[in-house]
Each structure stands twice: as structure tokens, then as C-alpha cells.
């Protein structure tokens, strides 16, 4: 009659199988986490840009979104007191902003929104720690934000 329990060999086989499955699943989990950070970044930019455009059209006054490359953040303060500041999710950094014909890599970029809903065509390049790039483009005529 065999005693109850598992042998050392059986436990080691189970541990090896679990390790192999974990090794196969881990890259997918890391990739999904990075994708979630990029989606959060796009959502933050889209919300703030939409809010600035909305306030410009509603109030009839120009509004301004400030993209701070050194602080890695986006800021909107309206004339009537609305205030939104968002830092980018960890692992993402604004590497450059092209506003019209001006290319900025280190500084603060002020993006105006006019009462008719237009702005300056802008491209924002965002880089992840793993060197993946995401490019956000703001259409000057409509103020719409598109990720590429």
C-alpha cells in the first residue's frame, strides 16, 4: 500500500510546467500593460483638448492648452476657472511637439484654441521606456485628436 501525498518528482514536474506557462504568458501581460498606459495617455490628451476647444467655442474667448515637456504633463486652465492638469502615465514621455512648422523638444508648448473651434495643427510624439512610439495629431480645422 502506497502512503498518501506526492513524491518530490511529481511536485518538481508540476513546478516546471507552471514555470513554462508563466514564461509564455508574461510577455503578453507586459504588452497589455503598455497598451493600457498608451490608451490612458490618449484618453487624457483627448479629454483636455476637447475641453479646451469646448470652452473656446462656448465662451467666445481663446483658450490655451500647455504641454510641458520637462514636467511631462498637459495643463488646461480656462478664463472661467476650469483647471485640469494631467501627468503622463509612468513609462511614457513626450519627446517632441510639432506646432505648425515649429518643432519643440525641450520646453513648454502653448496650444491655442480659438472661438471658432480651430487650432494650430500639432503633432505630439510620445515614447515609452521600451522605445515604442505613439504619435498624436491634432487637426487644426476641427481640433480632433487622432493617434497614429
Image (cartoon, rainbow, N blue to C red):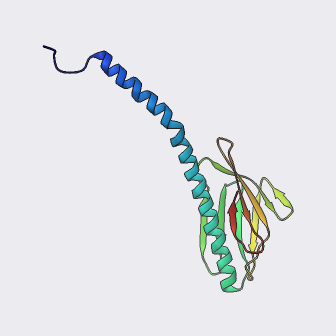
The x and y percentages for residue 54 are: 65, 78
For the image, the number of numbered tags is 0
Residue placed furthest toward the front: 1
Q: Identify which residue, 86 or 7, lies in the foreground.
A: 7
**What is the x, y in percent for residue 56?**
69, 80
Viewed as shown, does residue 100 lie left or right of 113? right
Q: In this rendering, does residue 77 appear at all? A: no
Picture residue at 16% right of the left edge, 16% below the top: 3
Name, please, the residue furthest toward the right: 101
Q: Position of residue 148 (x, y in %)?
A: 70, 56
Q: Which quadrant of the structure image shows residue 63? A: bottom right
Q: Look at the image and tell me in which quarter the N terminus lies.
A: top left
Outermost residue, top direction?
A: 1
Question: 3 or 103: which is nearer to us?
Answer: 3
Q: Position of residue 13 (x, y in %)?
A: 36, 21
Left/right of residue 37 with respect to residue 119 in the rendered view = left
Query: Considering only vertical position in the picture, is 18 above or below 139?
Result: above
Q: Where on the picture, by quarter, is residue 53?
A: bottom right
Q: Say if 89 sits above or below 53 in the image.
A: above
Query: In the rendered image of this protein, does residue 68 appear above or below residue 58?
Result: above
Report whether residue 125 is seen. Answer: yes
Residue at 53%, 47% (x, y): give it: 33
Q: In the figure, is residue 18 to the left or right of 65?
A: left
Is 54 above or below relative to 34? below
Of residue 6 and residue 50, the one placed in the foreground of this image is 6
Amino acid at each position: 500500500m502506497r502512503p498518501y501525498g506526492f513524491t518530490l518528482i511529481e511536485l518538481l514536474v508540476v513546478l516546471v510546467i507552471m514555470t513554462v506557462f508563466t514564461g509564455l504568458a508574461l510577455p503578453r501581460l507586459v504588452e497589455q500593460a503598455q497598451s493600457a498606459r498608451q490608451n490612458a495617455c490618449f484618453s487624457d490628451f483627448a479629454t483636455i483638448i476637447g475641453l479646451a476647444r469646448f470652452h473656446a467655442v462656448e465662451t467666445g474667448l481663446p483658450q490655451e492648452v500647455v504641454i510641458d515637456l520637462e514636467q511631462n504633463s498637459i495643463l488646461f486652465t480656462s478664463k472661467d476657472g476650469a483647471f485640469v492638469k494631467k501627468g503622463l502615465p509612468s513609462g511614457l514621455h513626450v519627446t517632441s511637439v510639432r506646432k505648425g512648422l515649429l518643432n519643440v523638444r525641450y520646453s513648454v508648448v502653448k496650444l491655442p484654441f480659438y472661438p471658432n473651434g480651430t487650432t494650430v495643427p500639432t503633432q505630439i510624439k510620445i515614447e515609452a521606456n521600451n522605445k515604442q512610439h505613439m504619435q498624436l495629431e491634432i487637426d487644426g480645422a476641427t481640433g480632433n485628436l487622432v493617434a497614429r
